[in-house]
Amino acid sequence: MPLADASVVLDGTREDARAVLEGHARNARETATSARSAVEEILRELPGAHRATARLGGAELASAVRQVASAVASAPVREEYPVLGCVLIELERQEVRLVATDRYRLAVRALQPSSFEGDPCRVLVGVAELKGITSWAMRLPDITREVQRQSVRLHGDGAERDLPTVSATRRLTHDASLDRQ
């Protein structure tokens, strides 16, 4: 707290002190929120063995997949831009987001996990693989989604389903090398 503000708190009226302290608390919360967002962004981008686990409702997950899958690019566009045939899954402490686009439409669905452990992370999963789990997920009250760098593993009611992730960098590098040929 700047010295001028500290002197108002110590020597000013109660109302002035309250206003200064409320302003200082508001600024501290905003700074902390910005810092947490910056650190989570850096953690998502760092290479290494990220691992995160989030618990979601099965019907809620199936519904979210259906909602965002409609925005995935058509087959001809996916041939040119394979990454547009994927759904981005972002796991953070407060929410799990599913995002898809065909370059013109954007679909985003945010889900509130009942629990979360690990580091914030994001992975790409092919839309066909993700759609394949919806009927299984729909019947389950809870699904635990475990994300590692190379796969997404879903646990529910004693069963497991694995979804391979797609490396956007590898896909884009592969596409660029094809363009040069």
Image (spheres, rainbow, N blue to C red):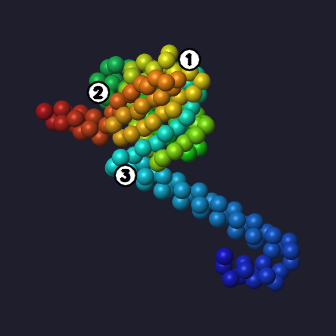
Placement of the N terminus among the 4 image quadrants: bottom right
In the image, 96: left or right of 3? left
On the picture, is 108 further left or further right than 47? Answer: right
> Which residue does the image show at 52% across and 38% down from the upper left?
54
Query: Which residue corresponds to mark 2?
Result: 80
> In front of the other: label 3 or label 2?
3
At which x and y percent is residue 163?
38, 28
Which of marks 1 and 2 precedes in the sequence? 2
- The vertical placement of 114 against 137, above or below, is below
Mark 3 and mark 2: span between their CA atoms? 28 Å
Q: Residue furthest front?
A: 158
Q: How many marks?
A: 3
Q: Is residue 3 above or below residue 22?
A: below
Q: Say which amino acid is labelled 3.
A: Leu
Mark 2 or mark 1, whichever is nearer to me: 1
> To which residue does mark 1 refer?
139
What label sits on residue 46 in the rendered view? Answer: 3
Q: Position of residue 110 (x, y in %)?
A: 57, 35
Distance between the Cα atoms at labels 2 and 1? 36 Å
Tell me how far mark 1 sits from mark 3, CA to CA.
36 Å
Q: Disc 1 vs disc 3: which is toward the camera? A: 1
Point 45% across, 36% down: residue: 146
Q: SS of the residue at dot 1?
A: loop
Do we see residue 132 in this rendering?
yes
